[in-house]
Image (tube, helix red, strand yellow):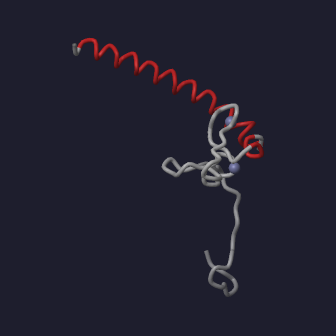
Amino acid sequence: MVANRELHAGEEIITEMPFVIGPKACTYPLCLSCFTPWPPKPNDKPLCSKCGWPVCGQECENASQHKDYECQVNKILIEELFSKFSQILRKIVIVNLFNK
Ligand SMILES: [Zn+2]
Ligand SMILES: [Zn+2]
């Protein structure tokens, strides 16, 4: 890439819309809607009333990105997670049975 004029340090030269957005795999807790660190206040820990994931509050819970997409998937993922967790607990009980 070659500039056709002199550029200043820190000058914005290009902007692009991201192909996809979301939290990193390893990050501090954050609102899934606006990516603000969560909880918003130490004694205020709002969760989405439908999927239970961290959000800033009603506005972020009802934001289209969360309500129409993430929230639907989160509900399915949580059900799968609890199902797998339940299967693991049953296996642990069986292992403990044979260790008696
Ligand atoms: Zn938020
Ligand atoms: Zn939700």
Number of callouts: 0
Task: Looking at the picture, tell me which residue is in the foreground, 84 or 61.
Answer: 61
> Is residue 3 left or right of 95 when viewed as pictured?
right
Please say if 28 is above or below 70. Answer: below
Image quarter in which the C terminus is found: top left
Quarter of the image for residue 73 reads: top right
Q: Quadrant of residue 58?
A: top right
Residue most toward the left? 100
Where in the figure is residue 1, as x and y percent of width and height? 61, 74
Q: Is residue 82 left or right of residue 40?
A: left
- Locate residue 25 relative to residue 12 in the image: left or right: left
Counting from the top left corner in percent of width and height, residue 47 is at 65, 39
The residue furthest front is 43
Give coordinates of residue 28: x percent, y percent: 52, 51
| Position of 93 relative to 7 (above/below) | above
Q: Nearer the viewer, residue 37 or 2?
A: 37
Relative depth, front residue between 65 and 86: 86
Q: Where is residue 72 shown, x and y percent of the image? A: 68, 31
Residue at x 36% of width, y 17% of height: 91
Position of residue 85 in the picture relative to residue 16 (left or right): left
At 58% from the left and 29% from the top, the residue drawn is: 77
